Image: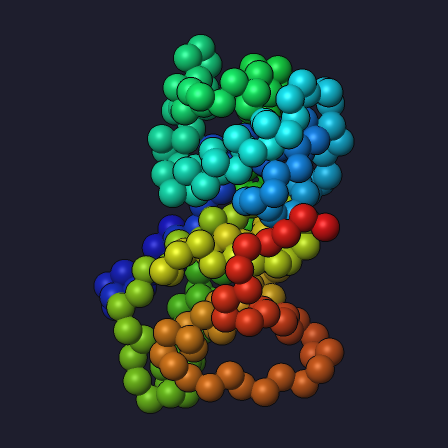
Amino acid sequence: MQRGAARGWSIRSAMPQALLLGLHLRDAAGLRPEEGHLPPADPPLTPRVRVPGAEAAAAQWSRWWAAALADEHAALAGILPPSFTGLRGMPELRGVAELLLDDALEWSAWQRERESRLLRRLPSALFEVGLVRDLELGLGRRLPPVDLELVVLPVRGRSWSRLGDGRFLLPLELRADRDAYLAWLGERLRELMHAPRPSVAPGRPGSVDPGPPDPGPCRDE
């Protein structure tokens, strides 16, 4: 959803189905990839099957995940039966998908509905507009044109990742906490405006430590 498009800035958030499917396949099969790590799903999934060639499947999952982050629509089309075109050359991961995709589809639909319920209870559109207005008034200048894309996933914790210029991965827990989300968003907007970070008293209610400007990818615990 876009905010303030007429003023040259927008904020969009989505929970892509392809990434939900990949998250479910990883955790439900107990894969431990060396790259492309992110925290476990929330609520946590326990492995449902013992996968032959789990090490190879985990390496293939990392390759697939990197491609899915770059092109979610192609990844979704490529992971669906009967052809699994996006898993060509990945026989072990295709085996995981053949075993678990039905469960993954059901779980992803439930997670997207869960996200919708949470965000309906905590609308943030007006607060985003107010945050931008207050920031511009405080700094005495307009926010430069910006297009922020937030990829929201149901993973444990509140560690976020920078996926690219103006693109971020946020845990649902952080996105659904209005005060914490607005504190995080304010930091990102200040970075764009090259503004100093305001001091925050330790333990202040509703505050969030957004981490350094670029913390890198999340890691499994």
Q: As rendered, which of 103 and 32 lies closer to the eye? A: 32
User: Percent position (x, y) of residue 45?
Assistant: 72, 34
Q: Quadrant of residue 100?
A: top right
Please tell me which residue is depicted at 53% across the width and 60% down the height of the picture: 216
Whether 11 is drawn above or below 152: the answer is: below
Q: Quadrant of residue 136?
A: bottom left
Q: How is the image coloured?
A: rainbow
User: Percent position (x, y) of residue 183?
Assistant: 55, 71
User: Percent position (x, y) of residue 176?
Assistant: 59, 55
Whether residue 28 can be seen here: no
In the displayed structure, does residue 68 sit left or right of residue 152? Answer: left
Please tell me which residue is depicted at 70% across the width and 31% down the height of the picture: 30
Q: As rendered, which of 127 and 213 lies closer to the eye? A: 213
Please tell me which residue is depicted at 64% across the width and 22% down the height of the picture: 53
Q: As rendered, which of 118 and 66 lies closer to the eye? A: 66
Please tell me which residue is depicted at 34% across the width and 55% down the height of the picture: 2
Whether 210 is drawn above or below 94: the answer is: below
User: Percent position (x, y) of residue 85?
Assistant: 39, 19
Whether 117 is drawn above or below 189: the answer is: above
Whether residue 209 can be seen here: yes
Q: Quadrant of residue 78?
A: top left
